[in-house]
C-alpha cells in the first residue's frame, strides 16, 4: 500500500507498474485526440471522440463525474485556461488554439496529461511564444524533479521560464501528486513562495502542469457552467502537463508516448 505522509505520497513498486500503464494509455489518447482534432468539429464532438478512445483502452475517464465534472476530458479554447466543457454549439476554427486535459483510470490507477496546439492557421507571434514558453517551462520543471530537491525547485524552474518569456503565470491552479487517485499531495505550484514543500523522494509521482497566459495571470470562472476558467483579459492561455516519477536518478516521464 502507498505510504501517505502529511504532504506527499510514496508509491509501492506494484502501484508504480499500474500507474505507469495508466499514464501510457492516457498519453496515447492525448496524442490521438490532438491528431484528430480539426477545424469544423464541435468541442462536444471532440469530447465524444475522446470518450470513445478512452473506452477502447479498457479504462474509463478519470474526469467524468469527478466533483461533478460533466465531460470526458477538459477542452479549453483560446482564452479558456482549464476545465472547458465540450459543447455542441462551439465550433472549432482554424485560428483557434486548443488545450486538451485528460485522464484514464484503469486497474486502480490514474493517468493525467495535457497539451495545447493550434488547428492549422499560422499563430500570431505572441501566441506562438506563449505555447513555446509553456512547453519549455514544463521541460524545465521536469528537469528539476530530482531526488533530494524540493517542490519549490520545480516551481522556481517553471517560473523562471515564464518570467523570461514575459507571460502571465497562473497562480490559482497548480500541479499535484497523481497515481492511485487523480489528485494526491503534494501541490506543485508554477511559482515560488516561502514554502519549499516536501523533499522529492523515489516513488513520488507528480503531475507537473504549467498554465501560462499571454497577458494577465488573473483568471475568472464562468458563472453559467461553474467550471470553465478564462483569462481575466480575454487573451489566450496555454497548458502542458506530464506525469513524472521521481527515481533514484533522472525523473521518468510517464506520459511520454512509448511502448510499454
Image (cartoon, rainbow, N blue to C red):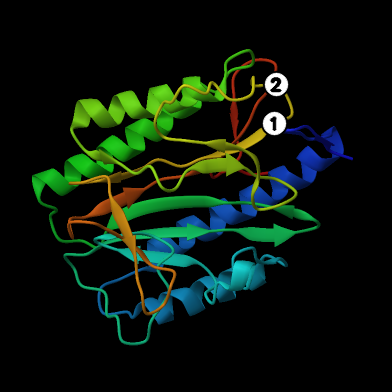
Apparent side of residue 7 relative to residue 47 in the rendered image (left or right):
right
Confirm whether residue 208 shows in the render: yes
Q: Nearer the viewer, residue 130 or 153?
A: 153
Q: Is residue 68 above or below residue 256?
A: below
Q: CA distance from mark 1 to mark 2?
A: 6 Å
Q: Is residue 17 above or below residue 113?
A: above
Residue at 25% over, 73% down: 39
Residue linked to disc 1: 204
Question: Tag 1: Cα neighbours inside 10 Å, few (<14), some, or many (≥20)?
Answer: many
Label pair 1/2, CB-CB below 8 angstroms: yes
Residue linked to disc 2: 201
Question: In x, y percent, where is residue 37?
Answer: 36, 68
Question: In x, y percent, where is residue 253?
Answer: 57, 34
Confirm whether residue 256 shows in the render: no
Q: Is residue 178 above or below residue 194?
A: below
- Judged from the image, the secondary structure of the residue bearing numbered disc 2 is loop
Q: Nearer the viewer, residue 134 or 257?
A: 134
Q: Residue 235, located in which quarter of the rendered image?
A: bottom left
* Marker count (numbered): 2
Q: Residue 151, located in which quarter of the rendered image?
A: top right
Looking at the figure, which quarter contains the N terminus? top right
Apparent side of residue 53 relative to residue 205 in the rendered image (left or right):
left
Looking at the figure, which quarter contains the C terminus? top right
Q: Residue 229, located in which quarter of the rendered image?
A: bottom left
Instruction: Please identify the residue farthest to the left as the structure is shown.
Output: 124
Amino acid at each position: 500500500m502507498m505510504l501517505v505522509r502529511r504532504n506527499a505520497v510514496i508509491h509501492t513498486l506494484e502501484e508504480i507498474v499500474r500507474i505507469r500503464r495508466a499514464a501510457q494509455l492516457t498519453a496515447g489518447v492525448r496524442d490521438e485526440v490532438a491528431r484528430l482534432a480539426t477545424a469544423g468539429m464541435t468541442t462536444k464532438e471532440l469530447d465524444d471522440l475522446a470518450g470513445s478512445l478512452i473506452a477502447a483502452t479498457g479504462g474509463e475517464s478519470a474526469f467524468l463525474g469527478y466533483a461533478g465534472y460533466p465531460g470526458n476530458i477538459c477542452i479549453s479554447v483560446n482564452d479558456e485556461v482549464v476545465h472547458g466543457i465540450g459543447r455542441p454549439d462551439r465550433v472549432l476554427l482554424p485560428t483557434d488554439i486548443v488545450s486538451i486535459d485528460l485522464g484514464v483510470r484503469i486497474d486502480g490507477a490514474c493517468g493525467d496529461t495535457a497539451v495545447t496546439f493550434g488547428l492549422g492557421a499560422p499563430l500570431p507571434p505572441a501566441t506562438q511564444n506563449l505555447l513555446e514558453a509553456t512547453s519549455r517551462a514544463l521541460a524545465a520543471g521536469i528537469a528539476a524533479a530530482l531526488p533530494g530537491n524540493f517542490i519549490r525547485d520545480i516551481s522556481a524552474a517553471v517560473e523562471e521560464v515564464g518570467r523570461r518569456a514575459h507571460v502571465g503565470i497562473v497562480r490559482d491552479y497548480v500541479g499535484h501528486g497523481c497515481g492511485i487517485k487523480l489528485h494526491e499531495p503534494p501541490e506543485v505550484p508554477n511559482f515560488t513562495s516561502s514554502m519549499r514543500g516536501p523533499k522529492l523522494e523515489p516513488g513520488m509521482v507528480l503531475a507537473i502542469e504549467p498554465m501560462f497566459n499571454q497577458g494577465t495571470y488573473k483568471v475568472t470562472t464562468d458563472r453559467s457552467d461553474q467550471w470553465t476558467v478564462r483569462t481575466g483579459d480575454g487573451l489566450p492561455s496555454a497548458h502542458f502537463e506530464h506525469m513524472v516519477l521521481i527515481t533514484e536518478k533522472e525523473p521518468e516521464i510517464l506520459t511520454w508516448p512509448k511502448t510499454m
